[in-house]
Image (cartoon, rainbow, N blue to C red):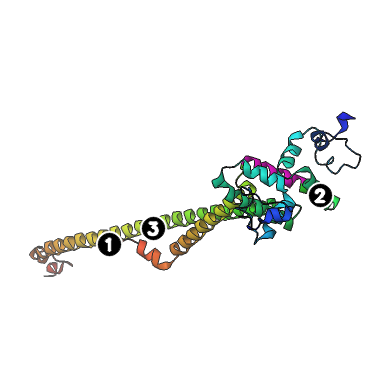
Amino acid sequence: MGGASPCASCKLLRRRCAKDCVFAPYFPSDDPHKFAIVHKVFGASNISKMLQELPVHQRGDAVSSLVYEANARARDPVYGCVGAISYLQSQVSQLQMQLAVAQAEIVCIQMQQDHDQQQHNINQLMLAADEHEKSYFLHNNFLNFSSATANVANVNYDSFKKEPRYGHDMVS
Amino acid sequence: MNSSRCAACKHLRRRCPSDCIFAPYFPSNNPRRFAYVHKIFGASNVGKILQDLPVSYRGEAANTLCYEAYCRIKDPVYGCAGIVDQLNEQLKVAEYQLATIKAAITTTLQPSYLLDQSLPM
């Protein structure tokens, strides 16, 4: 225990690393940069207060998010991780717009296809009706023709012979 | 003299000099703004960040520091990093939905799809 190496925080702060050091579980001595960056941005005192106000099982996540924010602020002192938020928000907005356009497009396509399908069905029905009508017409006309020719066959031609056409009987 | 102090100097209970680094960005009519950044970053760190920037960028930096501090106070575990995670998640979902719909559009426009949809003769 006396020989245990101080955590990265206590090394940087040049102090004795206590057994219950709040930083020790999250800032091991083999990664000095991790504590250095959060100390530069937030300050050791503020980190310590923030961690102590949290239940132990949430401190690991809190440290990870603080390290992320500190790194972002070190890379971009003006915007920090707020720059990433702005960028992501605009990406999400753009995608949502594209999504809305694509959804509208698929609705249009489906409506057009439904319309084309209905038109096709109507054409098919009309064609079928037309064919039926034609065959009905043809059938009925055939019957009429048949009966008409049958009547013609029953005409008495003898009555035509009795009536001269040019009065040749009057010559004698 | 008291009424001309900026919110930072009022909070820190000190005299507000004419070249106070905080005064342009932490006016006295909005004390909460400075209280947030002081709680999370500390006055000294905020002052260092602002000092290291050209004057034209300091306003924006002060705004983003306030926003970050506010997010951290609202969510002490994840802060702004939590918002970044949520947005990344939303982005993934939106990308997936868009890819799905584009695939559906491509399928719908295939000639074989149109033939399958026609009535049996």
* Badge 2 element: helix
Q: Residue at x 84, y 50 (%)?
A: B51
Q: Mark 2 lies on which chain?
A: B
Residue at image mark 2: B48
Residue at image mark 1: A131
**As drawn, B20 above or below A146:** above
Spatial separation of the CA atoms under disc 2 and disc 3: 71 Å
Magenta span includes B58:
no
Q: Mark 3 lies on which chain?
A: A
Q: Residue B104 in the image: state x and y as whole percent.
A: 45, 60
- The kind of residue tagged 3 is Gln
Crowdedness of circle 3 by 10 Å Cα count: few (<14), some, many (20+)? some
**As drawn, A149 above or below B79:** below
- The kind of residue tagged 2 is Lys
Q: Residue B74 in the image: state x and y as whole percent.
A: 63, 40
Q: Which residue is drawn at 38% across and 55% down?
A: A118
